[in-house]
Image (spheres, grey):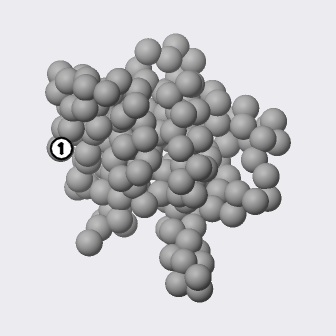
Amino acid sequence: MSLVISVSGSSGEDRKLTDEILLLAEQVGKAVAARNMVLLTGGKGGIMRAACKGAKENGGATIGILPFSKDEANEYVDIVLPTNMGYARNRLVVSMADAVIAISGRWGTLNEISEALMQRKPLVLIKGSGGVVDKLIDGEFLSENDCYVGVTSKAYTAVSQSLSLIKKKEENQRLI
């Protein structure tokens, strides 16, 4: 069974998104597909669209969990799951994934990061991507008790760290 990696980040409405940040998200999507994993996002624009685009360009499969309707999905989503749950769907975006990679972001991304921490999901924050991600990293909000959290500034390293954190969590669960 394929691993599922969720990419969380700003929607297309975030005016602070730059071409460089979107390219970073696209590279994450490509890296997920290169490892034969499934990419899961909130299915909309911005970071979500860029990551889906990267995955599709590299032959990967994508899933989008939409706040309301199928009409919200970007053109690179293979499996569209409309929830009619609004931002409550963020919990699904995290719970259905084996790991979460966060890029830039605003309130919805912060919510997904919080969900990942509460669910003890492997989480990788991409430093230098702006938004709430950099504020969390720079603000020393994360503690040493967050043992399934990684920080990197590179797309391919984020995916590798996700896999390492998934393995670490599986090993820890076997010991219990």
Quarter holding residue 12: top left
Residue 55 visible? The answer is yes
Q: Residue 60: horizontal and vertical position, in percent?
A: 25, 55
State the residue at coordinates (53%, 84%). 174
Q: Relative to residue 23, is residue 142 drawn left or right? A: right
Q: Residue 92: horizontal and vertical position, in percent?
A: 37, 43
Q: Residues within 10 Å of mark 1 (few under 14, many from 20)?
A: some
Instruction: Name the one closer to the observer, 164 or 97.
Output: 97
**Which quarter of the rendering shows the C terminus?**
bottom right
Instruction: Name the one closer to the observer, 145 or 131.
Output: 145
State the residue at coordinates (56%, 24%). 107
- In the rendered image, the residue lying farthest to the right is 140
Q: Relative to residue 59, is residue 124 drawn left or right? A: right
**Which quarter of the rendering shows the N terminus?**
bottom left
Identify whether 100 is placed above or below 165: above
Q: Residue 135: horizontal and vertical position, in percent?
A: 73, 32
Q: Relative to residue 30, is residue 22 drawn left or right? A: right
Q: Which residue is mark 1?
A: 79
State the residue at coordinates (54%, 77%). 173
Quarter holding residue 50: top left
Identify whether 162 is placed above or below 16: below
Query: How many marks can you see?
Result: 1
Residue 33 visible? The answer is no
Instruction: Determine whether the residue tagged by mark 1 lies in a helix, strand or loop.
Output: strand
